[in-house]
Image: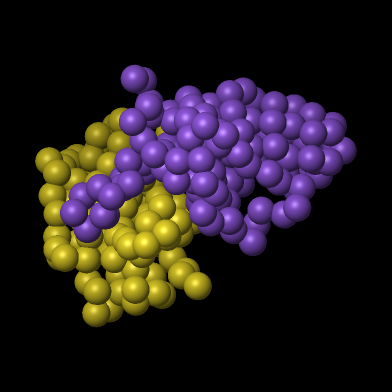
């Protein structure tokens, strides 16, 4: 396994269009996270899954955003009716779960999908 | 909610010198503090982390210290090399329950190591 894979790496779209990003986590990881990173800022948490269940969503995840992980493996993040403010790097991360204080649940990030909305 | 402040925003050092990046956090329940390195066009890569049950951790040229009373933690890089040039992010989270992966990141420090 080569790590967390994200596709596409770059997406340019016009305002109002829908876009979808895919994330393939490390195969044995049961937790999957989506983060958003804008230029010059640190990543911001959007949502996370334990297996196929979406357990937490940030207030940043507006109604136009939807994430799925149908079989507990890969995940998709869809943005409907894109706006220029959606332009960002969308990062996916995965982890094995467990108790952090015992050394588990370390997040491994993918290379990200960069979205540009014109 | 948690807030993480990171300083400095840019840091330029000469090759071989040490670099120190400092972060403070606001949520006293946070107990997991990772540091990530991000190179241009790549995702963040974990370089070291520390948990609240220890005060210091070292891995070759990299060390992290944690002061839970003062709610701050620091990254120390010794004998810097040009390949250390990147953006470094600190983060904090609560290491229990459903929020274990909800990392709150600082705004980053752009480190430049001059040969």
Residue at image location 36% in from the left, 20% down from the top: A2
Using residue A92 as the reference point, say whether residue B84 is left or right of it. left
Residue at image location 36% in from the left, 35% down from the top: A29
Asked if B21 appears above or below A68 in the picture, the reply is below
**Colour of the chain lettered A:** purple
Residue B106 location, x and y as percent? 45, 58
Residue at image location 68% in from the left, 44% down from the top: A66
Which residue occupies the foreground of this view, B29 or A32? A32
Asked if B68 appears above or below A104 in the picture, the reply is below
Residue B17 location, x and y as percent? 21, 45
Residue A86 location, x and y as percent? 72, 44
**Colour of the chain lettered B:** yellow
Residue farthest to the right?
A16
Residue at image location 26% in from the left, 54% down from the top: A99
Say whether residue B86 is visible. Answer: no
Using residue A85 as the reference point, say whether residue A8 is left or right of it. left
Using residue B89 as the reference point, say whether residue B80 is left or right of it. left
């Amino acid at each position: 396994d080569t790590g967390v894979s994200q596709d596409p790496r770059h997406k340019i779209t016009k305002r109002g269009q829908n876009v979808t990003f895919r994330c393939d986590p490390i195969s044995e990881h049961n937790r999957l996270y989506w983060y958003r990173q804008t230029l010059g800022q640190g990543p911001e948490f959007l949502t996370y899954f334990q297996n196929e269940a979406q357990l937490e969503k940030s207030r940043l995840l507006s109604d136009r955003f939807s994430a799925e992980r149908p079989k507990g493996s890969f995940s998709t993040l869809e943005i409907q009716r894109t706006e220029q403010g959606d332009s960002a790097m969308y990062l996916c991360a995965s982890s094995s779960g467990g108790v952090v204080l015992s050394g588990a649940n370390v997040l491994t990030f993918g290379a990200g999908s960069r979205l540009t909305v014109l | 909610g948690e807030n993480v402040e990171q300083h400095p925003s840019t840091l330029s050092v000469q090759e071989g010198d040490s670099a120190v990046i400092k972060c403070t956090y606001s949520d006293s329940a946070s107990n997991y503090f990772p540091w990530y390195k991000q190179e241009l066009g790549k995702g963040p890569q974990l370089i070291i982390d520390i948990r609240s049950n220890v005060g210091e951790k070292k891995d070759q040229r990299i060390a992290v210290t944690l002061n839970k009373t003062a709610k701050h933690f620091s990254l120390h890089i010794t004998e810097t090399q040009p390949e250390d040039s990147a953006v470094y992010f600190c983060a904090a989270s609560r290491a229990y329950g459903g929020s274990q992966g909800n990392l709150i990141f600082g705004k980053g420090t752009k480190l430049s190591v001059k040969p």
